[in-house]
Image: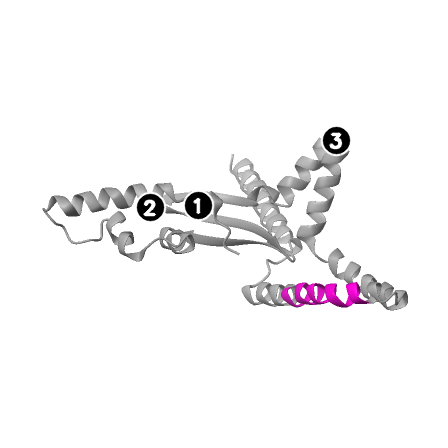
Amino acid sequence: AVSSSSSSNKHSQDYMSGQQQQQQQQQQSAPAAPSWEAWCAHFEQQDLQGTRLDALAAPLAAAIAAEVYAAAAAIKSEADALTAGDAVAVVQRELAAALLQERYADAAVLRDRGWALLEGWWACASPQHPLGHLLRVYAEYGRWTGKLYRAADVWDLQGWPEGQWGRLLGRSPRSSSSSSRVQGRAGSRSRSSRGTPAAIEPE
């Protein structure tokens, strides 16, 4: 009985040791997650490439207009190389091509892996921010960028009078006069009649 127990314990220890070695090998083979500094350096490089790509548009147009085709070809070659490095633009082009060719399975993979569903306007709210805010997600060179619009930002972009902002947020001093209550209701109607945030063109 003692021999059987010792053998069982040895098998258990060997199994645990094997599991630990396998986990260590998996951890060693797994690529290390990039550090924050590495991400910052990556996006700084992406910004430089995006800026350079934008700067090539004018000289390319000028070379074509002047019929200096050798220079235009050189500029276009550089622009094509920079465009190929824009991962978001690549995903968007491939997604559009997949949809055009009705390759819907490929399109779904590109949509999900490329985070294409993020693009557009999003309405957000939370208990900490009951007024909510708008989030616009759009493509930039090599990344998706999000821009947040609070209620105050929407107010400013629409050009509504500052005096009514506090009343609609309930920040104005409490008053028992009927005139204050009427002004507050009138301000609410004014805000809703001036348009919706979806019509905003912040840029």
Which residue is depicted at the point 70% across and 56% down? 86
How does the figure colour the protein chain or chains? one colour
Label ID, residue 60: none
The percent position of residue 171, horizontal first and vertical second, equals 22, 53
Say what secondary structure mark 2 lies in.
strand
Label ID, residue 102: 3
In the image, residue 17 sits, relative to residue 54, either above or below, namely above
170 left or right of 23 in image: left
The percent position of residue 126, horizontal first and vertical second, equals 35, 44
Q: How far is mark 2 from mark 1, CA to CA? A: 13 Å
Q: Are marks 2 and 1 in contact (CB under 8 Å)?
A: no
**Residue matched to label 2:** 131
Q: Magenta span: helix, strand or loop, mainly? A: helix
Nearer-N-terminus badge (2/1): 2
Give the residues in magenta. Answer: 47-62
Say what secondary structure mark 1 lies in.
helix
Q: Determine which quarter of the picture holds residue 40.
A: bottom right
**In-front residue for pair 19/7:** 19
Amino acid at pointer 1: Pro
In the image, residue 122 sits, relative to residue 72, either above or below, namely above
Q: Residues within 10 Å of mark 2 (few under 14, many from 20)?
A: few
Nearer-N-terminus badge (2/3): 3
Nearer-N-terminus badge (3/1): 3
**Is 145 a magenta residue?**
no
Which residue is depicted at the point 33% across and 46% down? 131
Q: How far is mark 3 from mark 1, CA to CA? A: 34 Å
Say what secondary structure mark 3 lies in.
loop
Amino acid at pointer 3: Glu
